[in-house]
Amino acid sequence: MVDNSNKQSDSARIAIELCDVKKNFSGQQVLDGVNLQVEEGTTTVIVGASGQGKSVVLKHMLGLMKPDSGQIKVFGQDISRTSTRQLKEIRKGFGVLFQNVALFDSMTIYDNVALPLRERTDASESEIRDKVEEKLEMMGLHEVDSKYPAQVSGGMQKRIGLARALVLDPKIVFFDEPTTGLDALKSNEIYRLFHDTQARLGYTAVIVSHDVPKIFKLSDRVALLAGGVIQSSISPEEFQRSENPLIRNFVETTMGPIYSSEREETTPL
Amino acid sequence: MVRFFETLGDYSLYYLEQAGRMGLFLMACLWRIFTPPYKIFPVVSQINFIGARSIFVIFFTGGFTGMVLALQGYYTLRKFGSEGLLGSAVALSLIRELGPVLAALMVIGRAGSAITAEIGIMRNSEQIDALECMAIDPYRYLMVPKFIAAIISLPLLTAIFDMVGILGGYLVGVAMLGVSGGTYFQGMYSSVDWNDIEMGLVKSLVFGLLIVWIATAKGYFLQNERSGGFGAEGVSRTTTSAVVLASVTVLVWDYLISAIML
């Protein structure tokens, strides 16, 4: 488990704050007053059953959706009420790994990773090449520059997506189901890369994941989204010991009763 | 009866919303065309796609349109003993009407459909969301080069269509049916004036804008389609609807511009 004790302190800056965020889709109240704080430099994992609105929360944080009411603050700035230009400025500090990676399928892998540098910086082609190669190297990707996303495996696509998300050294990185569709081996590889890159770059991470309990090993805070609200945002250990019935139910259904009973004797994490 | 009015209201609201969305989309694209930063390479690349790669099909349709115009025109004019007007009949028909309209319809079929499908797939696979999250403006990055390229390409393609059509008419009228070459071109010189060229030019510019607007907006708002824009079938349905809408719009605007300028 990652030792994150040094990351959390009372004086930690709040990177993202959701205050009473509500969102209704065609009469269905998907978010019914979501409150959440993500401290700078930490990893917060949002868990919850399918259809509870985890991706909707993420899209609100990214400014891709506007809430019906409530505030979404990124380093103190409410992105639900900023202009398009201000939102663009805020997003310059974001990196995103989408669930289906969302690589540009008509571009080579090199061009995919180079795109943010070409569009958002004045870097020369040689500087771009150095940076892209550094990130691809960091992800353990060799000699794939000229290939297209469809020509590589799902695990490699995720790593390319991560390289693209990190190419501008963002302050906050969002992961939407980063290991969906990968086998255990490939999932571990993605988690290892996440752990290594976060240790090296020190970014704040928000992860939406189903991969319980494995994802707990990487997290500082676990937030359960159920019934349109965040039930808790607590440490993984507290999460597993919580007496909150919704959390207990989630822990038991996702980890299974055997895991829950064993929890008393051994600390799995 | 109540159900009828409910459905009518529902449809009206949907189309009103759609029109508003597309109007704002057009404003956003036009605004970005005139504001920096300007990037040349993506525009050149799109001119290659929309313009240069359409030359082949424009060449053939223009040629055969001119040939059939000459053929039909010759037998009609001969009834009145006016074969000498063949050159002007072919040139005026092409320059004022058929050139801009048929070139636009060809571009809709070849490039417009491809643009809708490309942007629609990007929308469905979250590539447009990815651009936004990377703080890359999708209007500026994806739409603006296509808008500029279409507005530049359509008049040029129309000019090629007209020229090849006139030569096709020459081939049939002069080389095959025996009209004098001098008469063919002299009739053209004396009857075609700047107003005719201007009408063709205005039409092709407007058609270029309409085609690229409809093609890009349909793809961009794929998921707002009433028929459901999700998945491969959604892309296919939306592409078809973009082609139909663009074709009909071109014909409607052809009439409007003719009525205003004649």
Image (tube, coloured by chain):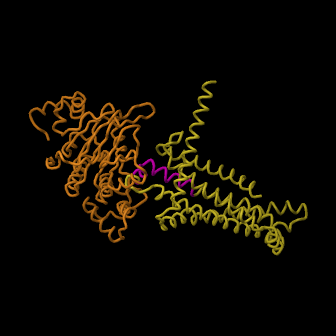
Chain colours: A orange, B yellow
Name the side, left or right, on which A46 lies relative to B93: left
- Quadrant showing the C terminus of chain B: bottom right
Q: Quadrant of residue B92?
A: bottom right
Q: Position of residue B206 (x, y in %)?
A: 64, 58
* Residue B6 included in the magenta stretch of the image: no
The residue nearer to you, when weighing B95 against A7, is A7
Q: Position of residue B100 (x, y in %)?
A: 68, 60
Q: Residue furthest bottom?
A: B182
Q: Residue furthest left?
A: A265
Name the side, left or right, on which A174 lies relative to B124: left
* Relative vertical location of residue B163 with respect to residue B14 in this rendering, above or below: below
Tell me what residue is drawn at x 86 percent, y 66 percent: B83
Name the side, left or right, on which A23 lies relative to A262: right
Q: Which residues are magenta?
A: B111-131
Name the side, left or right, on which B93 lies relative to B61: right
Q: Position of residue A98 (x, y in %)?
A: 34, 49
- Quadrant showing the N terminus of chain B: top right
Q: Main secondary structure of the magenta part?
A: helix
